Image (tube, rainbow, N blue to C red):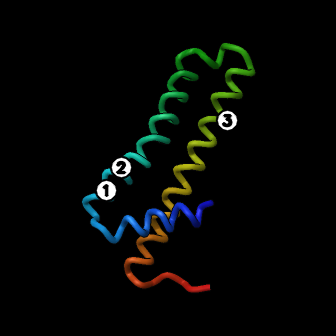
């Protein structure tokens, strides 16, 4: 699935960096907003709530952090492709 994401982004990348920048900004802001929101909710008292709610919030934070990590990895691959440094095979 990640390969398809890279391919989709790469195909759009060639059109214009200015067109791609808002997409990248949105892709970065979405998981950051989720991480921040759920962490703030936990800090404001949800930690005192049920273990189920706390666990659910922590799972969301973990998933969004992983998503953000994948985006960063994809951006690194795109940068390598653009500079011609991508490893083949």
Q: Residues within 10 Å of mark 2 (few under 14, many from 20)?
A: few
Q: Residue at the spot x=54%, y=28% of the render?
A: 38
Q: Is residue 89 above or below residue 33?
A: below
Question: In the displayed image of the protein, which residue is found farthest to the right?
Answer: 51
Is there CB contact under 8 Å for labels 1 and 2?
A: yes
Q: Is residue 79 left or right of residue 20?
A: right
> Which percent across, then down, holds residue 50?
72, 15
Checking the image for residue 21, the label placed there is 1
Marks 1 and 2 sit apart, C-alpha to C-alpha, by: 6 Å
- Give the mark toward the camera: 3 or 2: 2
Q: Quadrant of the C terminus?
A: bottom right
Checking the image for residue 59, the label placed there is 3
User: 4 or 86: nearer the eye?
Assistant: 4
Q: Residue at the spot x=48%, y=33% of the render?
A: 36
Is there CB contact under 8 Å for labels 3 and 2?
A: no
Q: Is residue 82 left or right of residue 5?
A: left
| Sequence-first disc among 3 and 2 | 2
- Mark 3: secondary structure: helix
Q: Is residue 53 above or below residue 60?
A: above
User: 47 or 34: nearer the eye?
Assistant: 34
The quarter of the displayed image where residue 65 is located: top right
Q: Residues within 10 Å of mark 3 (few under 14, many from 20)?
A: few
> Which percent across, then down, holds residue 84?
41, 84
| Sequence-first disc among 3 and 1 | 1
Q: Residues within 10 Å of mark 1 (few under 14, many from 20)?
A: few
Marks 3 and 2 sit apart, C-alpha to C-alpha, by: 24 Å
> Which percent across, then down, holds residue 63?
62, 42
Checking the image for residue 25, the label placed there is 2
Q: Quadrant of the N terminus?
A: bottom right
Q: Is residue 6 above or below residue 59?
A: below
């Amino acid at each position: 699935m990640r390969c398809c994401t890279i391919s989709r982004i790469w195909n759009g990348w060639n059109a214009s960096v200015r067109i791609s920048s808002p997409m990248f900004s949105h892709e970065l802001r979405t998981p950051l907003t989720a991480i921040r929101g759920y962490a703030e909710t936990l800090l404001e008292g949800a930690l005192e709530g049920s273990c189920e709610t706390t666990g659910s919030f922590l799972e969301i934070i973990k998933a969004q952090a992983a998503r953000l990590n994948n985006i960063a990895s994809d951006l690194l691959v795109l940068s390598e492709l653009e500079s011609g440094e991508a490893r083949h095979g």
